[in-house]
Image (cartoon, helix red, strand yellow):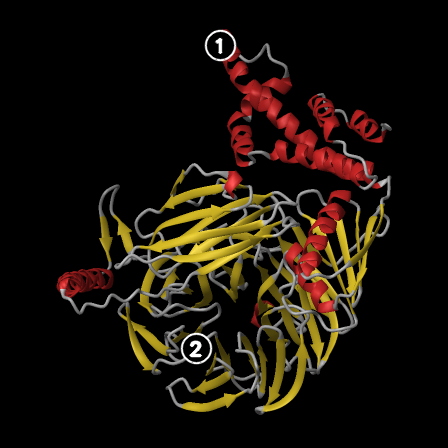
Amino acid sequence: MMEISLTRVDYTQVGVTSPKCLRLLPLAGKTQKAAIADHKGVLEVFSVKKGDAQPVFKTTPGPKINRLELGGPVGGVRERIFVTSGPEVKGYTKKGKNFLTFDTNMSENLLSMYVEGSDLFCCGQFMYNHYRDCKDTNYFLSGDQVNDVICLPTQTVKSITPILACQDRVLRVLTESELLYEVEVPGPPVTLCLFASNGGDDGTEVLFGTSDGRVGLVQIGRDCPSHLWELTNEKRNGGVLCLDNFDITADGVLDLIVGRDDGLVEVYSYDDSDEPIHRHTHTCSESITSVQGGILGTAGYDEIVCSTYAGWVLGLTTEQQTKALGPTEVITSPVAVQKITGLKTDLEQLQQKVMSEREKYQQTAQSTTAISAVPSFHINDKFVLNREDASYTLSLELQMPIDNVLLQSDVPIDLLDVEKNSAVVSYSACLPEEGNFLLATYRCQANTTRLELKIRSIEGQYGTIQAYVTPRVQPKTCKVMQYQIKPLSLHQRTHVFDEQRPHNSLKLTGQFSQGEMHSWVCFCLPELPEKTPPGDSVQFHFVSTFLDTQLECLYSKGTATFRSDNISTISILKDVLTKEATKKKVRLDITYDVNEDSIPYTLNLIHPKLEYQLLLAKKVQLIDALKELQVHENSTEFLSPEYRQILQDAEQLKVEYKRQPCHLERLYGMITDLFIDKFKFKGQNMKGRVPALLEVLDNYNLQTLVQFFEQSI
């Protein structure tokens, strides 16, 4: 298989960009033109000549632009540029003529849009509107936040079939103003793209990318969907922000290009298999907001054109910029030499300008009438639960370099190692009795614009994490970001519920509205929409990312029922909901039903995880002793195959053990909570029996543990 060699070339920098705000215009000549829109409200179309961006046209600044799409006649050339800002859609020709200014009159700002012939599909946070020839045609209110919208190609699929990517891990397929059906996907879908840019042979195949880094292909049938393939995110790379189809490998088959929020641009080839195979990765230091394959820089050389959050437009080109003559000598192309010389001149001029402005600022600051303005900056942040390791990823990204980030928490949390993180962390002493459980400072290296942290919380303990972000700007300024750790923080939305499991139930009745109960449930659980979903009753299902236990929430005006196979989940809900109702002075009548079979069932779910962690800890403890034996005997032949394997995997075992600090303590804690909660519902306090339980755990055997739980007092 031929190796792909791509070289980065920077073309220009604009303002901060939103996802899917860069498009290459159709090929008209030897190279293409690029259209990009930013948060300053500027739409710019440019071409590249001798490595430099030459503007074709540029609009004046205005409201922030959230999305850029190309449109044209059905089946024809898409060369008309459409942008959204606020509730407005504007259309421009490729030469810059403004031919459309359309106010949708939607009560929400437009966050996503798609154009298909004379049909315009617009979405706010929850609302979807379909306009034909700028006339309001269809409307739909989504049960959860809409992240993207697309429509199957009407040239192939004769009916209008819009698809909404929604935050609750669902693709909603519409027909007119009605929901045709829902497609559950493995993570919150963020971006949609037609497979092979035309939906495949019958126009019904749609690619999706999720915020937890998965990519999949689903076929949208008339009556039901079919999942064709899914790429798991085993390496725990960033969330997918953009997708494209382009034959960058020049083998006659379109490749899949993926842009991620941790700066990765990936190329996948289809080859002989249906599922794409990873071929190439390029790492940037900023999140990739758009990717598109084409020919922008040099005629005859394919490239992947990308835009980053901070506004850089760059190309990953197949053209070689340098030629190696030997181990230390390279020949650089004349265009590259010219560009380097130009950049050096620009840099010198900028340095002179910065020095003179700094002197001017110092003089002004010493005068009595000086006014110092605090520089404003935007933080692109994400706080997402990962199912694979039951942890939260907090990513913070700025347009300017980050100096330091101070993390403060009023709830017990663990900070996990992140390989990509080059910041130096230092911990400060804090007093938990004063409600301060963590103070950690991350000092970033020069030119770091993105920082990623991993956090693991403990269910039942809830509060707030605060991140104080200080960029490298003068005068010094800091912005505080807050993130809620919810009582059931490790639970994730799902759309399946196994009725065969033994369930414990909790029923609440009282003088509360459906909206009040929804706000209390939102306080307890993540991934729920802020707005109360429409209908007389609301039903949500959750799965624990740590234990795989499940939870059902069903509530309406005056009544709420919760079912779970984990009694600790029910106990946490009972305590928190009672507390919230008391704050609002709402009296609750509480009934509960404890299923004794649920205890051994939950212990069986914990068993493989606990057994694995105990074995891992045991292996790590043996490594040093085995190494000493190896040195002493100068051989490993006398060791059993099991011990030889431990020595062989020593480094890997140490890394895995280090990556999961407190994992064993967490599992012990969950079993202890389960024991206390079981008897709490019977009105018995079993805290005095905890040392005996820990003794059983130290000599762990599942059968003995189950018997300990079942023994009567």
Sequence-earlier tag: 2 or 1: 2
Relative to residue 365, is residue 501 drawn left or right?
right
| SS for callout 1 | loop
> Residue 315: horizontal and vertical position, in percent?
37, 63
- Eyeballing the image, is 397 above or below 619? below
Residue at 58% of width from left, 92% of height from top?
Answer: 133
Per the model, the C-alpha gap separating discs 2 and 1 is 67 Å
Which sits in the foreground, 610 or 269? 610
> Residue 379: horizontal and vertical position, in percent?
42, 61
Q: Which image quadrant for residue 170? A: bottom right
Relative to residue 127, is residue 245 drawn left or right?
left
| SS for callout 2 | loop
Residue 60 badge? none
- Rate crowding at label 1 as few (under 14), some (14 to 19) or many (20 or more) other CA atoms within 10 Å: few
Residue 263 visible in rendering: no
Q: Label 2 amino acid? A: Leu
Marks 2 & 1, CB-CB < 8 Å contact: no
- Rate crowding at label 2 as few (under 14), some (14 to 19) or many (20 or more) other CA atoms within 10 Å: many
Residue named by callout 2? 25
Which sits in the foreground, 344 or 253? 344
Residue 328 visible in rendering: yes
Relative to residue 418, is residue 495 drawn left or right?
right
Residue named by callout 1? 634
Q: Label 1 amino acid? A: Asn
